[in-house]
Amino acid sequence: MTLQEAPDIGEVVLHHTADAYSIGIEPFFSLSWERWPDLHLGGLTVNLTPTKHTFFLVIAALLVFLTMWIAGRLLERQRAHERAPSGFANAIEAMVLFVRNDMAIANIGADGAKYAPYIMTLFFFILYANLLGLIPHGATATGNVAVTGALAITAFFVIEISGLIKLGPQGYLRTIFPRVPGLSGAGAVAMSIIMAPIEVASKFVKPFALCVRLFGNMTAGHFVILSLVGIVFLFGHLPGWNWGIGGLAALTVLGIMLIEIFVAFLQAYVFALLTAVFIGLMQHEH
């Protein structure tokens, strides 16, 4: 193979990271479907065709349900026999208690227990979605900005609505028009009005940061792995370099894959933790 005959690595990377109307494990199994007609709702055009990322989102949701259901049933049986939690149930219980106590309650306060189910759902759902992209022929749905954007939108509404309920209308307005300590009279009013656009922008910057951080980290890892694999096809044809380049690339990819497993847990933790922090900041706004 000459350098000119080498595959287009850029196209390969985009093919494996982009969404598609097909799933499968070549050459054993392959399924593709046609795009459904668009729906026109007034001036808005919507297409509801399920995609590969939709398929893996459903799998992630089912895994979250099965994890909690199986762990709950095991805990009930163990406690019915007055045994301490063990095995799979003990591991899930430890993770749930960590998310509830050290993430939700620690950052939101006494009311954090009410938001713990939402924070736990975010953590486990994002974790499974991240890990599914690391299996052969899997897809990382969280590498789709539409998915991370939808998760960020849910966080935005929870943050703002919880703050409105906790602070009341007048207190919530203070999060937009803050009272600056040490100022009074016309100066305080002017500063409050000047700060309002910044406060409003900050409300949208928080979910935007959640969206972009998760999307960027999950996409970047796959780009790096696929690019390193592409080196084998670009330079592996050189005489005497086949085994050297292939072995070095394989070892590097293995290292990156191990890091990606850690990143999958880390990004689920960061998204859930920052959501809890933002809810807490809104509920305890001065």
Image (cartoon, rainbow, N blue to C red):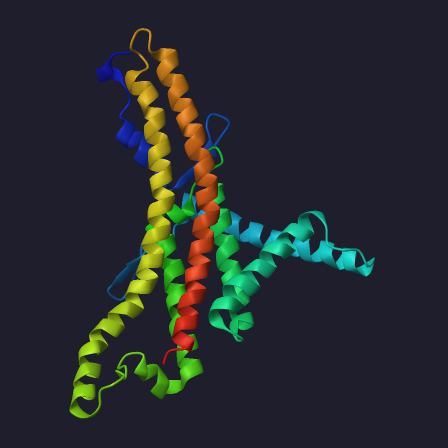
Check the image and name the residue furthest to the bottom: 185
Reply above or below: 157 against 237.
Answer: below
| Horizontal and vertical percent position of residue 46 | 32, 57
Depth check: give the residue in front, 195 or 71.
195
Compared across the picture, whether 194 is left or right of 117 comes to: left
Residue depicted at x 56% and y 64%: 100
Q: How many marks?
A: 0
Residue depicted at x 16% and y 85%: 190
Quadrant hosting residue 175: bottom left
Residue 215 in sight here: yes
Locate the N terminus and report the quarter of the image it occupies.
Answer: top left
Locate the C terminus and report the quarter of the image it occupies.
Answer: bottom left
Reply above or below: 251 against 145.
Answer: above
Residue 35 in sight here: no
Residue depicted at x 32% and y 53%: 212
| Horizontal and vertical percent position of residue 43 | 24, 64
| Horizontal and vertical percent position of residue 248 | 39, 20
Quadrant hosting residue 78: bottom right
Compared across the picture, whether 198 is left or right of 278 comes to: left
Compared across the picture, whether 165 is left or right of 121 comes to: left
Residue depicted at x 32% and y 33%: 13
Compared across the picture, whether 44 is left or right of 70 comes to: left
